[in-house]
């Protein structure tokens, strides 16, 4: 019997409905073709029949975690997407080498630090050094106490995986067609493999590919993909008053394994018993996910009627996989970034392994934000899962949406940061990047706050996200930063939870040039062309910025600027800035010069960041804000990932290496900036830039080295 359940939908009641979430973020996995699994199964049986010998048991100690920062070799083409942890939430392989075996040239057998070799570009031939070993035999333990607890029902067939039609959606009741629901069959409380028993007395967790292959499970400890929350299930919680409880017995029975590994219980982040059905092959693969590079993967055979009928292989490449001794009690650690596969050749019996993942002791000390939390689950609790997150149903709705807003500034990298954030598995795209629900899409006809809130939430998948408080969503509407007098009171009204806010800035001169190039460009969709407006189409860049200077002068905002000489009186500037008169003049300018029907306005005012930001800083708690510079993305010591890391930390999201760092909305244009114009613009913005830096160091506590003079024109 060969089971090749290759296709399995996770679109069921405990998984985030794919129809209501954008298809890039939450997808069902790819599958190894059934014919390929059948071939691998046949080959594995042939190897067992030929008497393939097990590798010699050698205790190498722990697998160095730096060996696990990437796969030992790229994915084989035939097994793309074929296992539970094979692809990331975008359906793409997480391997930095993501290519074919033809891209690899072997140099030596000595493993080196990942920084010393490899490439993130699959089109470039890389020089890969393979680790010396992928399996470490850590010891031998007596597993008979575990066997005694789990033998009942071990060879009962697993229930078929749930289908979308057979499971109610979250928050709904199953349809009964007017008939009384069928009474569920009774079960033995000591049969820990029984799904009903696990659902009622433990906690049910879905593992899509394992469920699809008919692999049974007894889950004791589990975590989300980022090790953000570690869940201890009831059947692994010792009772202080009842030593005969299942939790007490299993906890005690597993302790010898932890002692052999010389680890504490607190280091365990995943622990489960997995029953592989007879006649089933899990195809060649390597594990992926953020948890892999932080954890040590340990297997312990528990119930193996005939070890010669189980083929468990592991190695740095498909061709170099060695057979592992699966005698019960053999405690071995494997590099699960290496290639591995397993076949149960028994005719009737399941093969049971205990699978355990643990972290080094210093892991929790080094991870300062977000902090890992541990949760003891109650019997019968319901969990809601996506591919990379796990949430408790009792916490549904505890995260109001949106979680964040990118306020601006326009042409300062907001689209790039938005796209980077949306590559994170815990970030869900809104229905449109720039919602504008707080400015020109605000509906004045709605009479109540609740109606206006519902209108704004229509731009997000807020209702579908309620069961998943780990997930966040937000938009990037860069007009918000300047248009504070309209946006701030509306935001406070409809989003009372006050989302976190991100502000990206840029050299204001280069920002103005890019702004002009965008709105005068003839490239774009009909909708984009309409939004840009036509006011600047027949005007030169110099005319456009002169008009903005004159508008600000007329509104009383620039008493220190001489229109004729294009020079600044610094004494007047120093007295005027931060004065009540400046506040009045700034609001007059915003109310009269910031329209809603065009993007052709305020080329210079949009670069006066202190005036814009201070209105926001006065209205919200300072810790709600993160301010960065576009130039950080191209800085040799920082870069795009550095910018994303700061944004993720601000949003209390786990770190994540984004696979696509391509800049967005970048365009090539003729620079209209003449030297004489550049000179007076530098004179105009230099004191404004320093003023902005001073605001950030004094109000947000930012480093003076970074912000004392953010854009120097020396």
Image: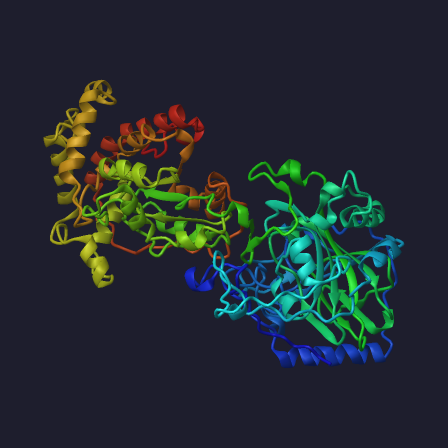
Q: In which quarter of the image is the C terminus?
A: top left
Q: Nearer the viewer, residue 696 or 139?
A: 139
**Residue 681, percent across and down?**
22, 36
The answer to whether residue 185 is left or right of residue 225 is right
* Residue 25 at least partly seen: yes
* Residue 563 at least partly seen: no
Instruction: Name the colour scheme.
Output: rainbow
Please determine whether, in this image, residue 128 is positioned above or below residue 212. above
Q: Which of 641 and 137 is in front in this view?
A: 137
**Residue 360, percent across and down?**
72, 43
**Residue 309, percent across and down?**
83, 73
Tag count: 0
Q: Nearer the viewer, residue 271 or 119?
A: 271
Question: Residue 699 falls in which quadrant of the image?
Answer: top left
Question: Residue 46 falls in which quadrant of the image?
Answer: bottom right
Please determine whether, in this image, residue 491 is positioned above or below residue 355. above
The answer to whether residue 282 is left or right of residue 527 is right
Q: Nearer the viewer, residue 279 or 507?
A: 279
The answer to whether residue 577 is left or right of residue 175 is left
**Residue 233, percent across and down?**
68, 49
Please determine whether, in this image, residue 486 is positioned above or below residue 580. below
Q: Quadrant of the N terminus?
A: bottom right
**Residue drawn at 67 percent across, 62 percent down:** 195
Question: Residue 82 falls in which quadrant of the image?
Answer: bottom right
Please determine whether, in this image, residue 569 is positioned above or below residue 475. above
């Amino acid at each position: 019997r060969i089971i090749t359940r290759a296709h399995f939908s996770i679109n069921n009641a405990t998984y985030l409905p794919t129809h209501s979430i954008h298809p890039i973020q939450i997808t069902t996995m790819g599958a190894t073709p059934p014919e390929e699994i059948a071939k691998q199964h046949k080959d594995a049986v042939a190897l067992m029949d030929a008497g393939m010998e097990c590798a010699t048991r050698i205790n190498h100690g722990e697998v160095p975690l730096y060996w696990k920062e990437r796969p030992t070799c790229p994915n084989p083409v035939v097994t793309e997407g074929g296992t539970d942890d094979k692809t990331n939430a975008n359906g793409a392989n997480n391997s930095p080498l993501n290519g074919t075996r033809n891209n690899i040239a072997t140099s030596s057998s000595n493993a080196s630090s990942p920084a010393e070799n490899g490439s993130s570009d699959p089109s470039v031939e890389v020089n890969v050094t393979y680790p010396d070993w992928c399996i470490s035999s850590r010891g031998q333990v007596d597993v008979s106490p575990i066997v005694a607890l789990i033998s009942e029902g071990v060879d009962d067939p697993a229930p078929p995986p749930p289908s979308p039609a057979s499971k109610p959606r979250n928050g709904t009741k199953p349809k009964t067609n007017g008939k009384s629901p069928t009474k569920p069959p009774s079960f033995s409380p000591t049969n820990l493999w029984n799904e009903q028993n696990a659902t009622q007395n433990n906690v049910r967790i879905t593992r899509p590919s394992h469920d699809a292959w008919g692999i049974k499970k007894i889950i004791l400890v589990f975590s989300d993909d980022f090790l953000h929350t570690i869940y201890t299930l009831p059947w692994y919680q010792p009772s202080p008053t009842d030593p005969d409880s299942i939790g007490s017995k299993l906890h005690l029975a597993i302790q010898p394994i932890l002692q052999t590994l010389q680890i504490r219980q607190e280091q365990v982040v995943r622990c489960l018993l997995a029953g592989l059905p007879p006649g089933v092959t899990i195809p060649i693969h390597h594990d992926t996910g953020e948890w892999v590079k932080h954890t040590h993967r340990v297997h312990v055979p528990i119930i193996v009627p005939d070890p010669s009928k189980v083929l468990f292989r592991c190695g740095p490449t498909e061709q170099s996989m060695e057979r592992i001794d699966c005698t019960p009690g053999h405690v071995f650690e494997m590099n699960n970034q290496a290639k591995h596969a397993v076949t149960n050749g028994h005719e009737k019996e399941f093969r049971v392994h205990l699978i355990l993942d643990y972290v080094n002791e210093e892991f929790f000390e080094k991870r300062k934000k977000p902090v890992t939390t541990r949760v003891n689950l109650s019997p019968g609790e319901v969990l809601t899962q996506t591919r990379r997150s796990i949430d408790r149903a009792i916490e549904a709705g505890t995260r109001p949406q949106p979680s964040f807003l990118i306020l601006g500034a326009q042409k300062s990298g907001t689209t790039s940061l938005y796209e980077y954030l949306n590559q994170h598995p815990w970030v869900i795209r809104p229905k449109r990047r720039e919602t504008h629900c707080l400015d020109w899409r605000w509906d004045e006809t709605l009479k109540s706050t609740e109606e206006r809130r519902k209108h704004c939430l229509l731009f997000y998948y807020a209702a579908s996200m309620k069961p998943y408080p780990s997930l966040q969503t937000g938009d990037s509407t860069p007009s918000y930063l300047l248009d504070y007098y309209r946006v701030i009171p509306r935001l406070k009204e409809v989003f009372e939870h006050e989302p976190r806010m991100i502000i990206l800035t840029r050299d204001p001169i280069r920002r103005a040039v890019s702004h002009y190039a965008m709105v005068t460009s003839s490239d774009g969709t009909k909708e984009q062309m309409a939004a840009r407006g036509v006011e600047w189409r027949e005007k030169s860049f110099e005319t456009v910025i002169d008009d903005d200077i004159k508008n600000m002068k007329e509104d009383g905002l620039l008493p220190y600027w001489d229109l004729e000489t294009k020079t600044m009186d610094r004494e007047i500037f120093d007295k005027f800035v931060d004065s009540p008169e400046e506040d009045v003049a700034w609001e007059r300018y915003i109310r009269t010069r910031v329209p809603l029907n065009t993007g052709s306005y305020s080329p210079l005012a949009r670069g006066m960041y202190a005036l814009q930001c201070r209105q926001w800083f006065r209205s919200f708690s300072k810790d709600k804000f993160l301010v960065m510079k576009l130039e950080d993305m191209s800085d040799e010591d920082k870069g795009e990932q550095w910018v994303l890391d700061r944004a993720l930390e601000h949003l209390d999201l786990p770190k994540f290496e984004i696979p696509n760092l391509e800049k967005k909305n970048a365009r090539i244009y003729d620079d209209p900036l003449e030297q004489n114009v550049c000179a007076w613009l530098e004179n105009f913005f230099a004191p404004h830039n320093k003023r902005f830096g001073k605001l950030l160091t004094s109000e947000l506590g930012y480093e003076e080295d970074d912000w004392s003079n953010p854009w120097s024109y020396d």
